[in-house]
């Protein structure tokens, strides 16, 4: 059996969450044949939530100098990187390692050292024009617990139509299309539940006078995140640049939550559009912003007023997710690849 190493990261966003899910699933399969490493760059800033406590399923080994990785007689090292984040593993590119390197690459840069790269989407590969490098495309594994635990009683949302957004609080990806669409359908029976908003999102909600909105702080608690998702009737995704995969879209799909999205406005992959092959009416292509808001509003209102339609969309999106990025399907692809190295 090969000896495998995996360099972890404990960040708040989709990358950190994906890292945790992959580590947990590989630990379950490889058991004592896989070791998990981290350094000071794996950790978050002191004022940010960290996932390190979520790694109780394994023993974490801290290293100070990247050269130390050669001391563990590994056959394969798996790293989870953007492809240009040299700061995360100082001197990694200069060291001669005894093992093969698999890079799970989430942004499509190819400046780091790897024998093989795993990209999460075909759209990312095509957009970055990186078909020439040794790679495979494997989507991010999406895990969830199938139950009905939610926050409706706690937040007094029973009998409300709850529109949700699971966001990243970065102003550079924030987009107000979903806020404006919600404002257009808001009434006394609707609530917008917004996880991890940017300050601009909070400001804009006040500017356009949204009355029924609840902002939630970021979390790395997976059980609490399940409860948040389970509170949504509809997930309204909005990102100003686009996605190299689209974790929050995939997470809502697999839970059977109808999800609307749209193109971003920058020179960036729109990988989340791949998910909408069975429900193309839930996705809005790039055009004049005011027209996109109008289209978003129509879709959202249809989901609000037509329960049969909402359930139909939910079923189609969930079926797609379970067939394409359910964690058991995806991790088997990882295992097959690792065993073939």
Image (cartoon, rainbow, N blue to C red):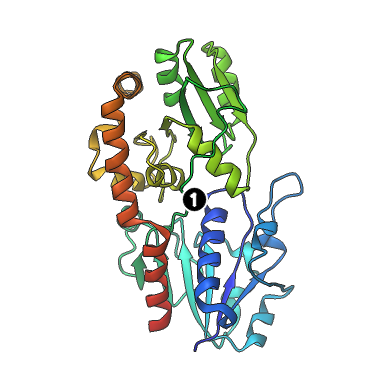
Q: Residues within 10 Å of mark 1 (few under 14, many from 20)?
A: few
Q: Name the residue furthest right.
A: 46
Where is residue 52 shown, x and y percent of the image? 68, 58
Where is residue 28 shown, x and y percent of the image? 53, 72
- In the image, 332 versus 13, the foreground residue is 332
Judging by the rendered image, the residue that carries numbered circle 1 is: 145
Residue depicted at x 31% and y 29%: 310
Residue 97 found in image quarter: bottom right
Residue 71 found in image quarter: bottom right
Please, is residue 206 above or below residue 275 in the view? above
How many labels sit on residues? 1
Asked whether residue 341 is in view, the answer is no
Where is residue 192 shown, x and y percent of the image? 51, 23
Left or right of residue 279: residue 335: right
- In the image, 194 versus 168, the foreground residue is 194
Residue depicted at x 52% and y 22%: 158
Left or right of residue 87: residue 80: left
Residue depicted at x 50% and y 67%: 25
Left or right of residue 52: residue 270: left
Please, is residue 118 above or below residue 164 in the view? below
Residue depicted at x 48% and y 44%: 147
Where is residue 177 shown, x and y percent of the image? 42, 25
Quick one: quadrant of the C terminus?
bottom left
Q: Secondary structure at mark 1?
A: loop
Please, is residue 298 above or below residue 271 in the view? above
- In the image, 51 versus 69, the foreground residue is 51
Asked whether residue 312 is in view, the answer is yes
């Amino acid at each position: 059996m090969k000896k495998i190493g995996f360099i972890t990261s404990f960040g708040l966003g989709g990358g950190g969450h994906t890292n945790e899910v992959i580590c947990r699933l590989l630990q379950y399969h490889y058991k004592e044949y896989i070791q998990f490493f981290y350094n000071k760059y794996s950790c978050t800033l002191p004022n940010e939530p960290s996932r390190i406590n979520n790694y109780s399923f394994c023993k974490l080994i801290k290293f100070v100098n990247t050269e130390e990785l050669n001391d563990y007689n590994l056959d394969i090292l798996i790293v989870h990187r953007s492809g240009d984040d040299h700061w995360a593993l100082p001197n990694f590119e200069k060291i001669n390692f005894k093992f093969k390197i698999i890079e799970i690459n989430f942004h499509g840069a190819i400046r780091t050292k790897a024998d093989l790269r795993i990209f999460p989407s075909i759209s990312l590969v095509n957009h970055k024009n990186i078909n020439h490098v040794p790679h495979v495309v494997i989507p991010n594994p999406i895990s969830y617990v199938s139950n009905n635990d939610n926050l409706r009683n706690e937040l007094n949302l029973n009998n409300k139509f709850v529109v949700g957004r699971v966001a990243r609080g970065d102003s550079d990806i924030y987009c107000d299309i979903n806020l404006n669409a919600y404002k257009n359908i808001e009434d006394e029976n609707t609530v917008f539940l917004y996880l991890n908003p940017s300050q601009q999102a909070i400001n804009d909600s006040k500017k356009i006078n949204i009355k029924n909105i609840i902002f939630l702080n970021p979390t790395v608690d997976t059980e609490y995140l399940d409860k948040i998702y389970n509170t949504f009737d509809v997930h309204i995704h909005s990102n100003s640049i686009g996605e190299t995969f689209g974790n929050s879209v995939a997470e809502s799909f697999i839970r059977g939550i109808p999800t609307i999205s749209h193109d971003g406005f920058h020179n960036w992959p729109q990988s989340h559009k791949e998910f909408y092959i069975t429900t193309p009416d839930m996705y809005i292509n790039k055009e004049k912003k005011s027209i996109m808001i109008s289209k978003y509003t129509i879709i959202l209102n249809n989901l609000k007023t037509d329960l049969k339609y909402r359930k139909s969309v939910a079923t189609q999106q969930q079926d797609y997710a379970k067939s394409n990025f359910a964690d058991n399907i995806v991790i088997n692809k990882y295992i097959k690849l690792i065993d073939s190295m």
